[in-house]
Image (spheres, coloured by chain):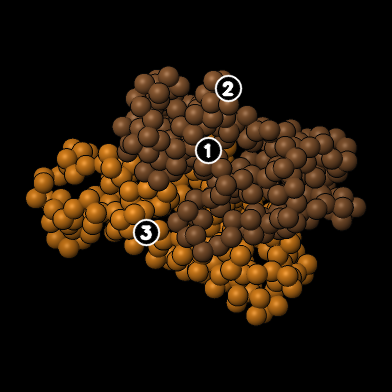
Chain colours: A brown, B orange
Amino acid sequence: MGRQQRAVRTRRVILEAAAAMFNDFGYDATTIGGLIERTRLTRGGLYFHFASKEQLARAILDETSALRPVPPQPLKLQEWVDMALLLGYRLPRDPLLGATVRLSVDLRARALFGTRWPQWTDAGEELLCAARDRGELLGHVEPAEVARLLTASWAGIRLLDEALPDGELCTQFAVFLELVLPNIACPGVLAKLDTSPHRAAALDRAT
Amino acid sequence: MGRQQRAVRTRRVILEAAAAMFNDFGYDATTIGGLIERTRLTRGGLYFHFASKEQLARAILDETSALRPVPPQPLKLQEWVDMALLLGYRLPRDPLLGATVRLSVDLRARALFGTRWPQWTDAGEELLCAARDRGELLGHVEPAEVARLLTASWAGIRLLDEALPDGELCTQFAVFLELVLPNIACPGVLAKLDTSPHRAAALDRAT
């Protein structure tokens, strides 16, 4: 493994460890000292990548707000569904994604960095607007409102799941989609949408 | 005003001030000293009601988890809608309600006190089960799943609204109900449901 490749891997290890600590302890209680203990890196090794806790938090927020676009589909609404399914699938698997929710509801972190909710809502709105322009949506649907509701429900589902981990995250996203889609999609479009949770694993490999 | 009445009022003043501080600064950063400054009570006056910050947090959580029942309606599903409308209406008006969400997503407070999400979900599930038993729901509806989704979305809507206060809380709850109800209620029931945000103010006076 070359030096650059090793550096990329170390950077990822640090980000994932910091994300796990933000998730478990919150922003204030996470310290560089604790992170060094967790990653078993030297102080210099860590500072080579990140100069401060602030930089770590920003890097996590930036990384997850740059949502990788979902693969193109014949129906734009399917792409919106795919975005929701993928987020649900990755949330328990990607500590950076969980830390993004945590940092966004943490008062101190929010005051320092804001949230990335607007980017998430914009990404959903863009797909829903494209779906509307192609005649896939029912007439009453307001893309901005529905996109914001998805972001809010997504965050709420995650936060409830953290506190009451008896449910299945994927199932709860599926419940959301099943309840909401029939009142968003034109009937002909609805029949063609694939909302099965199995779809998410395949999408994850494809993006 | 009698001594007892005055004590009840002072207790409420303290709870609302503590709730506002939990909302603004989080659990850890809220202190009894700060609360004394805010309420202009003496230390003894405050300790007469609450012995510690823990007790204050518990009292707020207990008070808001004892959701006042909504007035009975010919349709049980209307009572579920009314519960959702009332929560949306009271959230920006009742600091205790906001503090309940804050304390439930605050890692330290959650570790100490747990959350009241189960009570909220149970209250919704009970109404939805009663609605199902009366034939008001479509056949595929799982009361437990829908009740949990309402709690999650409700919490998420609140948390997004805190961060992006450009939206109207009431509108966002209405969007949720409008998107979800057509896929929950039997058509004959749906036509009779009143989901207008104006309804909430009247309900608030009635409960």
Specify the amino acid type for callout 1. Answer: Leu
Q: Are marks 2 and 3 in contact (CB under 8 Å)?
A: no
- Of marks 2 and 3, the one in the foreground: 2
Report in which chain the residue with disc 3 lies.
B
x and y, in percent, of residue B49 in the image: 17, 57
Identify which residue is drawn at 46% across, 65% down. B118
Q: Secondary structure at mark 3?
A: loop
Q: Secondary structure at mark 2?
A: loop
Task: Tell me: A64 left or right of A71.
Answer: left
x and y, in percent, of residue A112 in the image: 41, 26
The residue lying toward the viewer, choosing from A159 and A1, is: A1
Identify which residue is drawn at 85% across, 35% down. A133
Q: Is residue B172 above or below residue A2?
A: below
x and y, in percent, of residue A28 in the image: 33, 35
Mark toward the start of the polypeptide (1 vs 2): 2
Residue that carries the numbered disc 3 in the rendered image: B114
Specify the amino acid type for callout 3. Answer: Gly
Q: Is residue B94 visible?
A: no
Distance from the alpha carbon under mark 2 to that under mark 3: 48 Å
Question: Which quadrant would residue A191 be assigned to in this image?
Answer: bottom right
Task: Tell me: A19 left or right of A38.
Answer: right
